[in-house]
Amino acid sequence: MGATLGSGQTPGPGELIDRVLAVVEGQVIMLSDVRAHLDLRLIAPPHAADPTLVLTALIERQLILDEAARFVEAPPSDEVEARLAEVVRRVGGTEAFQERLLRVGFTVDDLRQVLRGDLRIERYLARRFVSARQPTEDEVAVYFRDHADEFLTNGVLPSFDAARGEARRRLSEGLRQERIDDWVASLAARADVVRVRP
């Protein structure tokens, strides 16, 4: 994450002391980072409920951020503040947000740093992976058939003609994500990553 976030807090009675979970190219990922991403809902499914998956996602995030920082400028502060407002809304408002920050040992500036990195990563990936190959009509039809449950609306499956555009979009995004996943795997294979056992 570029810095150890939340690690300067003094634990209170009964609180779990912070510790290092991984080191990625010299950058430390702390237990507080994982707890913050879980508690502040900063990470999307399927990782959202599993600390081990969150740690893996944060390791991959750091690898991507190291690349992005070389090519993408820091996002404007208004974009960071807009993303911060989204987090506040997502966790239930200002009071709940402040309680969660306190619980995970983050400051608002710690969170801004995370969100700034997220925005930088999004811009970098959008630039590097502009689009995937366009799927064929047969591939779109197979995708629609194999993912029919995902297209149900009130229990009703639309016709393929009605769902073709959305099916193509989802399949294209999936193909793009496969390219990103392969690239991240190649970064991880070359990187110095150490997971610290409890």
Image (tube, rainbow, N blue to C red):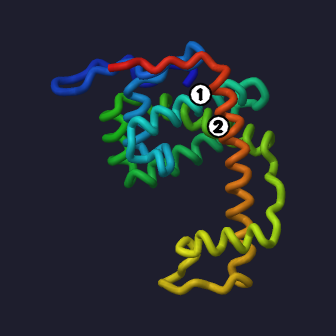
**Residue drawn where x is 70% and y is 62% of the image:** 171
Which class describes the residues within 10 Å of circle 1: few (<14), some (14-19), or many (20+)? many
Question: Disc 1 marks which residue?
Answer: 62
For the point 81% across and 48% down, which residue is it?
Answer: 130
* Residue 2 numbered mark, or none: none
Which residue occupies the foreground of this view, 195 or 85? 195
- Above or below, comparing residue 23 to residue 181 in the picture: above
Q: In the shown orientation, is residue 182 left or right of residue 5? A: right
Q: Nearer the viewer, residue 101 or 48?
A: 48
Query: Where's the N terminus, which quadrant?
Result: top right
Q: Quadrant of the C terminus?
A: top left
Taking the image as shown, residue 115 lies to the left or right of residue 93, namely: right
- Residue kind at label 2, given as amino acid type: Ser
Residue placed most toward the observer, 186 or 100: 186
Give, as a three-letter code, the residue at label 1.
Gln
User: Quadrant of residue 188 in the image?
Assistant: top right
- Relative vertical location of residue 81 with respect to residue 191 in this rendering, above or below: below
Going by the image, does 69 lie left or right of 94?
Answer: right
How far from the left and from the top, in percent, is residue 109? 50, 30
As measured in the structure, the alpha-carbon distance from the residue carrying label 2 to the one carrying label 1 is: 21 Å
Residue at figure coordinates x 69%, y 30% from the top left: 186
Residue 190, position as x, y percentages in the image: 67, 20
Pinpoint residue 17: horizontal percent, then vertical percent: 28, 21
Compare marks 2 and 1 and give the one earlier in the sequence: 1
